[in-house]
Image (cartoon, rainbow, N blue to C red):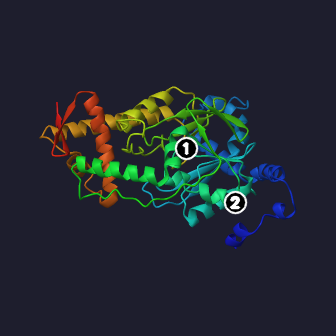
């Protein structure tokens, strides 16, 4: 029955009603989601962002005044096979109707995305623009499925252009770099970095840069470039409401991996993603963010506490690595295996990235040194 509803043409479309008509109808259907949105507000208030005194004055609080605005942001949850678990997209109602992230490319995920739109009476054809927070498949994989049905523009950070324009050649350049990186880690023959090539034949791509503004769902958002997890991560944040869409940059309960990637074609040295991530975290620490809408997990308040926790975790991991190095020189793979012995197969690359990122930090602090031996890098404590 649900499948038939998703595949059937909407009644509004059959009657010839306009996109604006359907958008207005979607706003009317918000009465069906008000309960869920107010429940979200209540959960957030329990975390202490609004005091009990604020709630007992008898006057309308700022959070209560923002209730309808929160209801204009519709979370859509999709299943994935990734370690992070389910992935979120967000539908921003209002003009222009905006979809932030799209889930993965699988048919099941695309159908779940359709269902999220159908819950407020919309289809892919009613989406007026897509925003991709970063170029990882669980966040951008649904773009082509949407564009098969709708001529909708896609906004992404300008650093994604090399990936989109480079196609197979860029994929092969990345694979070659990762093979060399794995050998230098001492993991040659242990990890196979090869991934199948998946073409990203997007249409109507528009590139954003740090400091740009974008109108989405009737609100104006600022673009904040936050590299580290990837080289394409960006956040959208609203200085009026404090709403922030952060992708994987700032998850509440887990730290997103800072992935090792090749240098851009016009650069000589590879990025140091953990150092980038630390700078990105610093940039957001004092911003007036309120409700954080992450790529995985529930919306939350208190981004400063999460940032402080990430810095603490990085310090503890650096200390762990230093203790291991005090016993003698180690390769990245040896350190990763000692710290994450449960990682197997392709997942070993996650450990290599994590360790290399913290070694980059220790090198910058002159707390470690590196020496190459027959193509493999050994690290020692200082």
Could you tell me which quadrant the C terminus lies in? top left
Query: Is residue 29 depicted above or below 258 in this figure?
Result: below
Coordinates of residue 344 in the picture (x, y in percent):
29, 59
- State the mark number for residue 373: none
* x 22%, y 46%: residue: 335
Q: Quadrant of residue 216?
A: top right
Question: What secondary structure is marked by label 2?
Answer: loop
Work out whether residue 301 or residue 73 is closer to the camera in this orientation and state it.
73
* Residue 73: x %, y % from top left: 67, 45
Q: Which residue is mark 2?
A: 149
Q: Residue at x 28, y 49 (%)?
A: 180
Q: Is residue 247 visible?
A: no
Neighbour tally class for label 2: few under 14, some 14-19, many 20 plus, Cα within 10 Å? few
Residue 213, position in %: x, y?
64, 32
338 and 156: which is toward the camera:
156
| Residue 246, position as x, y percentages in the image | 54, 40
Tell which of 171 and 185 is nearer to you.
171
**Circles 1 and 2: CB distance less than 8 Å?**
no
- Farthest left residue? 328
Secondary element under disc 1, as helix, strand or loop, is loop
Say left or right for 240 vs 19: left
Q: Nearer the viewer, mark 1 or mark 2?
A: 2
Q: Which residue is mark 1?
A: 133
Q: Nearer the viewer, residue 166 or 31?
A: 166
- Quadrant in which the N terminus is drawn: bottom right
Mark 1 surroundings within 10 Å by alpha-carbon count, few (fewer than 14), some (14 through 19), many (20 or more): many
Badge 1 or badge 2: first in the primary sequence:
1
Observer able to see residue 294: yes
* Above or below 115: residue 241: above
3D distance between C-alphas at marks 1 and 2? 22 Å
């Amino acid at each position: 029955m649900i499948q038939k509803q998703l595949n059937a043409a909407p009644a509004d479309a059959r009657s010839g009603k306009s996109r604006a008509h359907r958008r207005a109808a979607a706003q009317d259907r918000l009465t069906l989601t008000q309960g869920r949105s107010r429940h979200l507000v209540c959960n957030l208030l329990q975390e202490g962002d609004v005091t009990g005194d604020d709630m007992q004055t008898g006057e309308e609080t700022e959070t209560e005044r923002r209730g309808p605005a929160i209801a204009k942001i519709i979370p859509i949850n999709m299943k994935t096979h990734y370690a992070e678990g389910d992935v979120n997209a967000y539908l921003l109602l209002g003009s222009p109707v905006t979809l932030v992230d799209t889930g993965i490319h699988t048919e099941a995920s695309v159908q779940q995305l359709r269902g999220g739109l159908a819950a407020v009476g919309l289809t892919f054809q009613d989406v007026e623009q897509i925003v991709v927070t970063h170029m990882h498949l669980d966040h951008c994989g649904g773009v082509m499925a949407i564009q098969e049905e709708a001529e909708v523009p896609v906004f992404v950070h300008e650093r994604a252009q090399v990936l989109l324009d480079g196609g197979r050649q860029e994929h092969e350049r990345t694979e070659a770099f990762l093979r060399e990186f794995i050998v230098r880690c001492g993991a040659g023959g242990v990890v196979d970095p090869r991934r199948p090539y998946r073409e990203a034949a997007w249409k109507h791509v528009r590139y954003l840069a740090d400091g740009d503004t974008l109108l989405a769902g009737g609100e104006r958002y600022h673009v904040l470039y936050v590299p580290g997890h990837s080289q394409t991560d960006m956040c959208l944040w609203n200085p009026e409401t404090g709403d922030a869409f952060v992708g994987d940059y700032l998850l509440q309960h887990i730290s997103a991996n800072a992935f090792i990637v090749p240098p851009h074609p016009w650069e000589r040295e590879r990025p140091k993603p953990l150092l980038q991530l630390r700078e990105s975290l610093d940039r957001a620490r004092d911003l007036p963010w309120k409700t954080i809408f992450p790529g995985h997990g529930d919306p939350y308040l208190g981004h400063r506490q999460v940032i402080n926790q990430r810095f603490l975790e990085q310090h503890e991991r650096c200390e762990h690595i230093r203790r291991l190095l005090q016993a003698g020189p180690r390769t990245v793979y040896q350190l990763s295996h000692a710290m994450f012995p449960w990682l197997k197969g392709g997942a070993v690359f996650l450990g290599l990235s994590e360790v290399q990122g913290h070694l980059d930090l220790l090198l910058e602090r002159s707390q470690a040194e590196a020496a190459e031996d027959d193509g493999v890098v050994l690290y020692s404590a200082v």
